[in-house]
Image: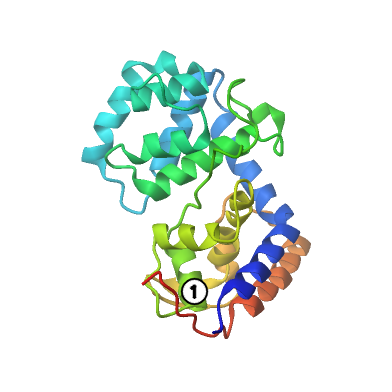
Amino acid sequence: MITMEPKLRELFDFLKNNREYNKKLQENYYKSIIMPNDNVVDKVISLIYTIANTQSQPRIDLLAPFYKKILEKKNELETFKGLITLIRQKEETPLNYNALFNSLKDQPGLGPKTSALFTKTIFHLHNNQYSQELKIWDDAPNEIHVADELYLPVDIVITNIFNQLDKEIKWDFNRVNKKIKELYKGAEIEIWDDLWFWGFITQNGSGNKRTFEWNENKYWTLKDSDKDPVAINKINEKANEFLDIIDMVPVNKTDLK
């Protein structure tokens, strides 16, 4: 039976070999959130609000109690441990990224995608791959240990890519993460985070009715992207490589239905 695993491995190799483009954009984005704030608490609060507002339709009535809980005991945000304990309200909670994700996911109004996005961002700020001035806490892990894990923040950009890979499956957050984790573990999941960047700039249209093509206008809407013409031409070339990988993929029948 033809499976989608070879295409996933090809995609992973593409993402791994072209990390510089999304990394540069992300670092600029993180700086715009973190650097204007002088202290740890304000940095964390800014990050929480910014990422929650990336939702297409923020559930304000559900998010408000979460914000109140955070702000009423904001001094707890001085440490990674304090944030997890404040959200989870359990002292015995493991101090790792999986615990952070699950603690956030259980908060009404956040959901798995936003929780995964916040967790991935905290990992980026502390994994020593980005500017040290972005680091918030001393007690946040700088790597993903065996008992820890990350989740890919899956939105419609990514589900559309997986729909291109296999149109017979109704892809969502859980199914995409399950499929990826059949092949990749730990920090390898973080490499898959670049899939959103390449998917965003190669999709045209809205909802599930999108065409796949280099979309320079979308690239220009990314505030922190490199607007140098030489850089744009290079990214255009790489985007076409990405499109070649995901195009004309045979249908894979799996047990994910």
Q: Which quadrant is the N terminus positioned in?
A: bottom right
Q: Position of residue 144 (x, y in %)?
A: 61, 39
Q: Is residue 99 left or right of residue 27?
A: left
Q: Residue furthest top?
A: 75
Which residue does the image show at 69% across and 48% down from the upper left? 24
Q: Position of residue 256 (x, y in %)?
A: 40, 69
Q: Residue furthest right?
A: 230
Q: Residue 22 or 173: which is nearer the viewer?
A: 173
Q: Residues within 10 Å of mark 1 (few under 14, many from 20)?
A: some
Q: Residue 152 or 70: which is nearer the viewer?
A: 152
Q: Tell me if I can see residue 69 in this picture.
A: yes
Q: Tell me if I can see residue 228 in this picture.
A: no
Which residue does the image show at 41% across and 46% down from the upper left? 114
Give the answer, above or below, for where 58 lies relative to 33. Answer: below
Q: Position of residue 226 (x, y in %)?
A: 69, 54
Amino acid type for the residue under numbered disc 1: Asn
Q: Is residue 225 left or right of residue 108?
A: right
Which residue does the image show at 34% across and 46% down from the upper left? 111
Give the answer, above or below, for where 79 lies relative to 87. Answer: above
Q: Which quadrant is the C terminus positioned in?
A: bottom left
Which residue does the image show at 41% across and 50% down from the upper left? 113
**Quadrant in which residue 15 is drawn:** bottom right
**How many marks can you see?**
1
Describe the colour scheme in one phrase.
rainbow
Q: Position of residue 82 (x, y in %)?
A: 45, 19
**Quadrant in which residue 108 is drawn:** top left
Local secondary structure at mark 1: strand
**Quadrant in which residue 227 is drawn:** bottom right
Give the answer, above or below, for where 21 lies relative to 107. Answer: below
Q: Which residue is mark 1?
A: 204
Q: Is residue 112 left or right of residue 64?
A: right
